[in-house]
Image (tube, rainbow, N blue to C red):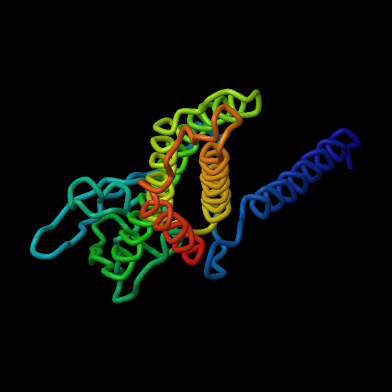
């Protein structure tokens, strides 16, 4: 046998063995397990030369039909998003029925054997819609409560500055206006009533309680100023303030404070 021919035959034989082995390795590497245990070809986004086919599915919703063009490798969740505009249904409020079985949003069309021209039924998920609406209302209430607390806190900060000024005047022996004390007390009582009307849940419970205690402390400080202001002074023994005229409101304020404490 010619040595040259033998060498050429060996080269072709080796090439065939390598090509078979490489092809098998590549085919195994291109497989993946999809939901449901199906073995399918692995998707490789880097291979731009391979185009993903687009299919048209007919979706029935009530008495109307919608023809949707979508990638064959898309998920049912993506299909729900495309159906949101023509049907007016939120994706979370949709149920997609294919072959008499509801399909998960995470399931893929090709894995569930959805083909071009397949028919899918769309129904509204009433329970999901109600749950989502309740969640939205809850979020709105939390947002409103948080905004109200922030506004009250800002207002109390400004009022606390006025209270500090009154305390400074009293500590230096100055005359504190009875009207200033009464007006400031009235405003603090209004803030206390507003705090009582805020329904705080979760993380808002503690901030609300802090503001309630803060306002109550300011009211107690004003009551002490009023009492101090009503005591006779050394300049003739006359009191600059007459607490008798305001005795009924003084008795009512502790009652309101106690009611807020009971609601905490």
- Residue 73 visible in the picture: no
Q: Position of residue 45 (x, y in %)?
A: 55, 38
Q: Position of residue 63 (x, y in %)?
A: 8, 64
The single residue placed furthest to the left in the displayed view is 63
Q: Quadrant of the N terminus?
A: top right
Instruction: Identify the residue at the far front of this view.
Output: 236
Q: Residue at x 88, y 37 (%)?
A: 2
Q: Position of residue 215 (x, y in %)?
A: 52, 45
Q: Residue 141: x and y, percent?
A: 37, 52
Q: In front: 140, or 254? A: 254
User: 25 or 113: nearer the eye?
Assistant: 113
Q: Is residue 3 above or below residue 83?
A: above
Above or below, 140 against 101 in this view is: above
Tell whether 108 sits left or right of 87: right
The residue depicted at 41 percent of the width and 44 percent of the height is 191
Going 43% across and 49% down the picture, which residue do you hit? 192
Query: How many marks overall?
Result: 0
| Closer-to-camera residue (30/200) | 200
Task: Look at the image and tell me whether residue 188 can be seen.
Answer: yes
Classify residue 138 by image quadrant: bottom left
């Amino acid at each position: 046998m010619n040595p040259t021919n033998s060498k050429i035959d060996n080269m072709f034989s080796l090439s065939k063995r390598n090509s078979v082995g490489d092809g098998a390795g590549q085919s195994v590497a291109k497989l993946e397990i999809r939901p449901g245990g199906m073995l399918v070809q692995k998707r490789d986004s880097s291979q731009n030369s391979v185009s993903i086919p687009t299919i048209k599915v007919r979706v029935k919703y009530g008495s109307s039909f919608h023809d949707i063009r979508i990638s064959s490798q898309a998920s049912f969740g993506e299909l729900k998003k495309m159906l949101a505009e023509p049907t007016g249904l939120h994706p979370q409020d949709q149920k997609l029925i294919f072959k008499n079985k509801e399909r998960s949003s995470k399931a893929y069309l090709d894995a569930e054997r959805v083909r071009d021209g397949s028919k899918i039924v769309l129904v509204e998920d009433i329970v999901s819609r109600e749950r989502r609406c309740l969640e939205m209302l809850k979020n709105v209430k939390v947002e409103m409560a948080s905004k109200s607390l922030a506004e009250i806190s800002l207002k109390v900060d400004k009022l606390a500055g006025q209270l500090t000024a009154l305390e400074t005047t009293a500590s230096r022996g100055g005359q504190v206006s009875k009207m200033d004390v009464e007006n400031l007390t009235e405003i603090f009582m209004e803030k206390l009533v507003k705090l009582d009307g805020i329904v705080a849940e979760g993380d808002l419970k503690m901030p609300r309680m802090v503001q309630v205690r803060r306002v109550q402390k300011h009211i107690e400080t004003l009551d002490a100023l009023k009492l101090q202001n009503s005591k006779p002074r050394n300049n003739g023994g006359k009191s600059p303030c007459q607490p008798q005229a305001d005795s009924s409101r003084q008795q009512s304020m502790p009652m309101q404070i106690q009611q807020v404490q009971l609601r905490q």
